[in-house]
Every structure is written in structure tokens, then in C-alpha cells.
Amino acid sequence: MFITFEGPEGGGKSTQIRLLADHLREHGFNVEVTREPGGTSIGDQIRDVVHDTANTMMAPTAEVLLYSASRAQLVNQLIRPALKAGRIVLCDRFADSTMAYQGYGRGLEREMLAKLTEIATGGLTPDLTLLFDIDVASGLMRRLTEGDEMNRLDLEAIDFHERVRKGYHALAAAEPKRWVIINASRPVAEVAADVQRIVAERMAAMARRP
């Protein structure tokens, strides 16, 4: 099973992915946790470049190609082998981030992004995508107050992040069977309980399929 964690900044994805992984492992599941960009040695090198706040001259097309290169490496080196081995894969961001950030946020042509994503992923799509939704201003403030490192995209203007959030909602509305929207402004424990319930229900539904 392939589960992705998506959402605007400050939604607590990294915390929730760790909590879910611990929960699943306690129940005997073999879990692989990864992230985008990164997840491999090559991907981590790309992450350093694309997130470096010094790279203010990076063109949006260069940005999306770097993200896609990291994704292609991650899918081929880690995700597909893990799924083939029967592991549950939890990924902190995946292809939907490209559509939200570079499509809705940057305004790049979405049909082109879809074709690029198809190349990078080889057509791999998640079984379940959790959208950790939070008000943009609250999410960015949460990152600042918690002392999280702010990368190049975090430092974009508020209106960019508003477009990203609206993009996520548009993506979720277009594929309601894959996406579940979670109110991420609540306490961590409440959100974690929802995540565990949603994943358990989806796993049970998949197990019933012929």
C-alpha cells in the first residue's frame, strides 16, 4: 500500500507520518518511510539545491525539473522495490506537490506537469493521499514558532501559499476516492487518531477487493 502525505506548510505532515509509521509497526506491518524531494542519496543532493534559500534566481521550469528528477530516482530506487516486497510505503509529499506548488502556485501549465509526472513516476499513483489542511497564515506561523528550517519555497509570499492551498483542494475535489482532507489545526493526538482510523479503513477496504 502506498500512502502519501500532502498539504500546505505547517500542517504537521512530518510528525504525523512518524506517528503512523510507529503505529503500523507496533501492529506488525513492515513500513518504509520516505520523503520528497530526497529519500535517496541522489535525491537528497537535489533537495539541497532546490531548497537552498540562496538560489533566488532558480527558474520555475528548472525547479520542477529538479523535483521530478528526485522523484524519478525515488520511485525507481526505493518506492517500487518496497511495494514489490509487500511493504507499506509512507511518503512525505509526492507528485501532487508538483501540481499544487508548481502548477497552482507558480502557474506552470498543468498538462505539461502531468506529462512530466507520468515520466518521473512511470504512472505510479498512491492508494491513499492525506491532505493535512491548515490556514496558510497559521501554518507558516507554526513553522516559525517551532523553529523549523525555512526553505526557499517557505519564504514565498502569502499569496503564493494561498494558491497552493487552493490547488490542493482542487486536486482533492477531482479525485475524492483517493484523497481524504484532515483538519490539521487540531492537537497532534487528535489528528493522529484520525489518520490511524482512515488508514485502517482503507486497508480493510483494499483487503476486501477481489
Image (cartoon, helix red, strand yellow):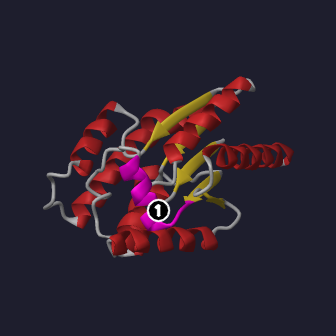
Residue 83 visible in the current orientation: no
Whether residue 138 appears in magenta in the rendering, the answer is yes
Residue 20: image quadrant is: top right
Q: Is residue 44 left or right of residue 91?
A: left
Q: Which residue is at 25% across, 37% downward?
A: 45
Residue 152: image quadrant is: bottom left
Choose between 159 and 114: the one closer to the eye.
159
Instruction: Report x, y in % for residue 40.
Output: 37, 33
On the rendered image, what quadrant is the N terminus found in? top right
Give the magenta-colored segment's residue range: 133-145
Choose between 158 and 95: the one closer to the eye.
158
Choose between 21 and 127: the one closer to the eye.
21
Whether residue 163 appears in magenta in the rendering, the answer is no
Q: Label 1 is placed on what type of residue?
A: Ser
For mark 1, what is the residue?
A: 138
Q: Is residue 62 left or right of residue 184?
A: left
Residue 57: image quadrant is: bottom left
Q: Secondary structure at mark 1?
A: helix
Residue 38 visible in the current orientation: yes
Q: Which residue is at 56% across, 49% downward?
A: 4
Q: Which residue is at 82% across, 42% downward?
A: 207
